[in-house]
Each structure stands twice: as structure tokens, then as C-alpha cells.
Image (cartoon, rainbow, N blue to C red):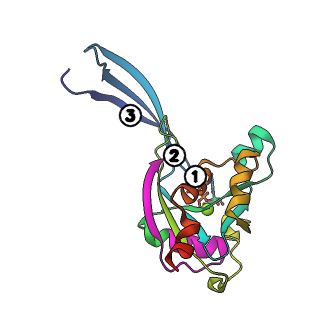
């Protein structure tokens, strides 16, 4: 076998909100031997996430909502996250601006694309595009909260970045995309932009 990977069979074993597929593949190992593998793949589409931050006040906007895996696994009644959503066919920039207003009530003017990342590449297809945007309290045009008819019931939180970072260490924030963006904010010095520019 010359190629690294040959798909032998693909079978959709469940199709609902997402699609669960079982693949049979021949994989050429680095030593040249070919190994037959079975792999499952869950696809719910790609998504986008955004950190809203206010350098003037040192705050970030986060959302709190019910997430079934965290409830089933640990009894957590809610997770604290950055605003995020599934693309549903739209481009990441357009979708995240709409999502930010739906979930947080803040109108986003300049969403900066930062990078992309696979959420959990062992078996999940999802790739997220990450964004950051400055906001000010005057950018609030609604209450947010998400779409009730989709079952969303989202509480909007505004916290100092320092408090949010401490909540990672205390275990109150356990969502990976949120940890990643909060740490990015610290590493990139997002809160220092205004002060050093003036
Ligand atoms: N019918 C149905 N609806 C669902 C299901 N799972 C979620 N939903 C509803 O669909 C909504 C989709 O809302 P979005 O804001 O578009 O997505 P999200 O759930 O916030 O997802 C974001 O965060 C996820 C967790 O990190 C990411 O996986 C996802 O890509 C995205 O970034 C959810 O809030 C929920 O109400 C399901 O299995 N069935
Ligand atoms: Mg969402």
C-alpha cells in the first residue's frame, strides 16, 4: 500500500443532531506494515468562539448555561463559557457576530480572527475558529440569553479577567475553549493594549 491511509468502509450508525460514523481503514505504520483499524467519528459541524473583553475595565463577558455532559458526568448544573456557536452553514466571522448578540446582548463591531483548533481530534470532527473583540458597556443592545425555542437559557456574566483566570485554577471554569481564550488574553496582553497605546 503506497498511501498512508485507505478507507475500506464507512457506515453511518446514527444520525440525529450529529452524525456518528464507523470507519474501517488500512493504516500504513511508520515501519511500513499495514494495520486495519476501526474508528468512530462524531460530526456535529464546525463552530466559532469569541472572547469579548474591555481593556478599559479589565473585564470579559462569559455565559453560563446548562450542558448535559457536565451534568451527567459530575452533576454540574451549569458551565461557564465564552460565547460560542455552531456555524450552521455560515462563515465563522458572520456567525460569531450574530451569536455574540444572541447570547450576550452585545453588538460586536470588530471581531478579530485569532486561530483555529480541533476541539477533540480523537473522534470528534469539530473545528473551532477563535475570535476576540473589544466591547464597552455602551455596546449592549439587548439582554442576550440565547434562543428559547432552541432550549437555550443563557446567563450573561461580566467578570474581571483576573477573576476568570482564578476560576480556572479553582475548577469553576472547566470548558477548554474558554480556558484557551482566557489564557490567550493574558499571554497576548489584551488588557494592556489601551494603557500602552495612550
Ligand atoms: N435538538 C437538539 N438540540 C441541541 C442538541 N444539542 C444542543 N442543542 C441545542 O442547540 C443549541 C446550539 O447552540 P449554539 O450556540 O449554536 O451551539 P453551542 O451548543 O453553544 O455550541 C458551541 O459550544 C460547543 C461546546 O464547546 C461547541 O461544541 C460548538 O461547536 C459551539 O462552539 C444549543 O444551545 C442547544 O440548545 C441536541 O442534541 N439536539
Ligand atoms: Mg452557544
Of the pair 104 and 7, the residue shown nearer to us: 104
Point out residue 175 in the picture as x, y percentages from the top left corner. 65, 49
Labels 1 and 2 touching (C-beta < 8 A): yes
**For this view, does 149 lie left or right of residue 42?**
right
Is 28 rendered above or below residue 168?
Answer: above
Q: Quadrant of ligand 2?
A: bottom right
Residue 111 within the segment the image draws in magenta: yes
Q: Residue at x 66, y 65 (%)?
A: 150
Is 150 rendered above or below residue 117?
Answer: below
Q: Magenta region: which residues?
A: 96-118
Residue 67 is at least partly visible in this image: no
Number of other residues with Cα within 10 Å of mark 2, as a class: few under 14, some 14 to 19, many 20 or more? some
Q: Which residue is mark 1?
A: 177
- Quarter of the rendering containing residue 78: bottom right
Of the pair 125 and 187, the residue shown nearer to us: 187
In the picture, the disc for residue 119 is 2
Residue 39 is at least partly visible in this image: yes
In the picture, the disc for residue 10 is 3
Q: Residue at x 74, y 59 (%)?
A: 163
Question: How many numbered dots are placed on residues in this image?
Answer: 3
Q: CA distance from mark 1 to mark 3?
A: 30 Å
Q: Residue at x 75, y 38 (%)?
A: 73
CB at disc 1 and ligand 1 closer than 8 Å: yes
Q: Earlier in the sequence, mark 1 or mark 3?
A: 3
Number of other residues with Cα within 10 Å of mark 3, as a class: few under 14, some 14 to 19, many 20 or more? some
Q: CA distance from mark 3 to mark 2?
A: 22 Å
Residue 13 within the segment the image draws in magenta: no
Amino acid at each position: 500500500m503506497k498511501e498512508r491511509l485507505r478507507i475500506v468502509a464507512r457506515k453511518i450508525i446514527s444520525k440525529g443532531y450529529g452524525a456518528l460514523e464507523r470507519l474501517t481503514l488500512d493504516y500504513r505504520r511508520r515501519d511500513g506494515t499495514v494495520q486495519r483499524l476501526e474508528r468512530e467519528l462524531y460530526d456535529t459541524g464546525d463552530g466559532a468562539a469569541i472572547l469579548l473583553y474591555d481593556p478599559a475595565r479589565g473585564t470579559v463577558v462569559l455565559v453560563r448555561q446548562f450542558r448535559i455532559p457536565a451534568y451527567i458526568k459530575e452533576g454540574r448544573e451549569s458551565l461557564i463559557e465564552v460565547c460560542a456557536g455552531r456555524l450552521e452553514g455560515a462563515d465563522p466571522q458572520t456567525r460569531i457576530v450574530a451569536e455574540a448578540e444572541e447570547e450576550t446582548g452585545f453588538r460586536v463591531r470588530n471581531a478579530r480572527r485569532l486561530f483555529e483548533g480541533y476541539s477533540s481530534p480523537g473522534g470528534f470532527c469539530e473545528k473551532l475558529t477563535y475570535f476576540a473583540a473589544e466591547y464597552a458597556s455602551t455596546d449592549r443592545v439587548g439582554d442576550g440569553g440565547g434562543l428559547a425555542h432552541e432550549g437555550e437559557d443563557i446567563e450573561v456574566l461580566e467578570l474581571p479577567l483576573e477573576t476568570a483566570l482564578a476560576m480556572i485554577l479553582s475548577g469553576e471554569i472547566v470548558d477548554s475553549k474558554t480556558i484557551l481564550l482566557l489564557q490567550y488574553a493574558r499571554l497576548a496582553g489584551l488588557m494592556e493594549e489601551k494603557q500602552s497605546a495612550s
